[in-house]
Image (cartoon, helix red, strand yellow):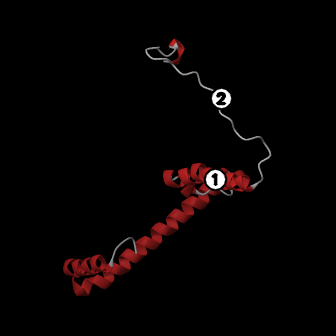
């Protein structure tokens, strides 16, 4: 739950008992639950209003896609995964082309300077 272990949850309960006391703790928990329900309802209403305002073109719009982590995962990593899966399937197909032969490279002699391209820098 929220990345908390049993020790952290126990410590939070003890702190809540010390701060609110055993008499007020149920009332505080009920108020926190009501607040969370209201916030969730407001967020759902805002999302529905946004979808209604955008029109039918954006019916599949999800505001969570605007989170940078989800955006990168959806638009970059999924494409990479698709490319990876396609190359795997292509590797399994029999090769028809001739094998790769590298072009010969002119080697520099001792003390010879490599060619300089002023436009490359």
Label 1 element class: helix
Give the camera-side residue of 85 and 76: 85
Residue at the spot x=65%, y=33% of the render?
102
Cα gap from disc 2 to disc 1, whole angstroms: 28 Å
The extreme right residue here reads 96
Give the camera-side residue of 108 and 21: 108
Place of residue 106 in the rendered image (x, y in percent of width and height, measured from the top left) = 58, 21
Place of residue 11 in the rendered image (x, y in percent of width and height, measured from the top left) = 24, 78
Query: Mark 2 or mark 1: which comes first in sequence?
Result: 1
Compared across the picture, whether 1 is left or right of 95 comes to left
Q: Where is mark 1, residue-wise?
A: 84
Q: Where is mark 2, residue-wise?
A: 103
Give the camera-side residue of 91 and 57: 91
Place of residue 67 in the rendered image (x, y in percent of width and height, measured from the top left) = 51, 53
Residue at the spot x=66%, y=54% of the render?
82
Label 2 element class: loop
Up-down: is 81 above or below 116?
below
The dot on residue 117 is none
Compared across the picture, whether 100 is left or right of 27 comes to right
Residue at the spot x=55%, y=59% of the render?
46
Q: Classify the position of the N terminus by image quarter.
A: bottom left
Circle 1 crowding by C-alpha within 10 Å: few under 14, some 14–19, many from 20: few
Q: Are marks 2 and 1 in contact (CB under 8 Å)?
A: no
Give the camera-side residue of 9 and 21: 9
């Amino acid at each position: 739950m929220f990345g908390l272990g049993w020790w952290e949850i126990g410590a939070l309960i003890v702190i809540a008992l010390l701060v609110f006391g055993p008499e007020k703790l149920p009332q505080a928990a009920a108020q926190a639950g009501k607040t969370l329900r209201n916030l969730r309802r407001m967020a759902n209403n805002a999302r529905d209003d946004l979808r209604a305002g955008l029109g039918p073109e954006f019916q599949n719009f999800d505001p969570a896609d605007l989170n940078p982590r989800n955006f990168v995962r959806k638009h970059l990593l999924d494409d990479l995964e698709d490319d990876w899966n396609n190359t795997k399937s292509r590797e399994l197909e029999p090769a028809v082309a001739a094998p790769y032969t590298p072009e010969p490279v002119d080697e520099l002699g001792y003390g010879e300077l490599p060619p300089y391209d002023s436009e490359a820098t």
